Amino acid sequence: MLETMEISDPESLRAIANPVRQRILMQLAVAGHARAADLAEAIGHPANSVSFHLRVLARAGMITEAPEHARDKRDRVWKNVATSYNVKPAAGDAADLILRPTVEWLAEVFAHGSHEETRDAGRTFMLTTMLLDREEANELILELSQLLNRWSERSLAASRDEPAAAREVYQLLTAVAPRDDPRGDGTPRDGEGS
């Protein structure tokens, strides 16, 4: 199994952009391998819909059959090909397919309350501005990455240990970049500087 699969081609990008397929990948990460019917039950979607999504993920090379876990030759069991998937920002329509729906979701989170009001409901919205040099920014990015990886591994392990426990899919959007130079190339943002 690959540690990380780089997503850069349009077919893989479209495959991973779909929230149902993201949940299927996550469930396969928890279970290790599964049949369409098992995945359908786990994520609460019809089996025929899950079968369609599995075929899309397989065509994109993100999952593969696991015949070693099949009961017979007709039994189709699936597994992830990688531990994680990394979307390259410049990949095709990445902004339209992945970022725009995420920003819409973020706007909805923001519209439903402040940090103080929603913390006990398992949700929050935080925007923090810092004065950093490049070295400090890189150190922050590394620490955030390690923290998110640790929590991701912890949540997968807890899901494996207690498969019947009620869990929801949570999202966290993290962006660290210079506010006035988001491209990082010294070019001012559109509409500024001229």
Image (spheres, rainbow, N blue to C red):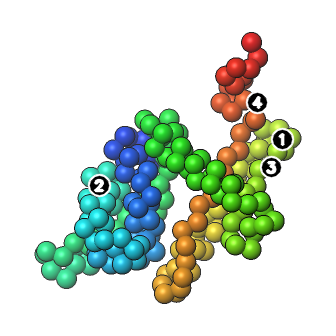
Circle 2 SS class: helix
Q: Which mark sits nearer the N-terminus, 3 or 2?
A: 2
Q: What is the three-letter code of the residue carrying label 4?
A: Asp
Residue on which the image places disc 2: 56
- Distance from the alpha carbon under mark 1 to that under mark 3: 12 Å
| Mark 1–mark 3 CB contact (< 8 Å) | no
- With respect to residue 34, does 132 lie above or below? above
Residue on which the image places disc 1: 132
Give the percent coordinates (x, y) of residue 82.
42, 60
Dot 1 surroundings within 10 Å: few (below 14), some, or many (20 or more)?
Answer: few
Give the percent coordinates (x, y) of residue 24.
40, 66
- With respect to residue 185, does 114 lie above or below? below
| Mark 3–mark 2 CB contact (< 8 Å) | no
Q: Specify whether 165 is left or right of 178.
A: left
Circle 1 SS class: loop
Mark identifier at residue 180: 4
- Distance from the alpha carbon under mark 3 to that under mark 4: 15 Å
Q: Which mark sits nearer the N-terminus, 1 or 2?
A: 2
Of circles 4 and 1, which is in front?
4
Residue occupying the point 74% across, 20% down: 192
- Distance from the alpha carbon under mark 3 to that under mark 2: 38 Å
Residue on which the image places disc 3: 128
Q: Quadrant of the C terminus?
A: top right
Give the percent coordinates (x, y) of residue 120.
74, 74
Q: What is the three-letter code of the residue carrying label 1?
A: Leu
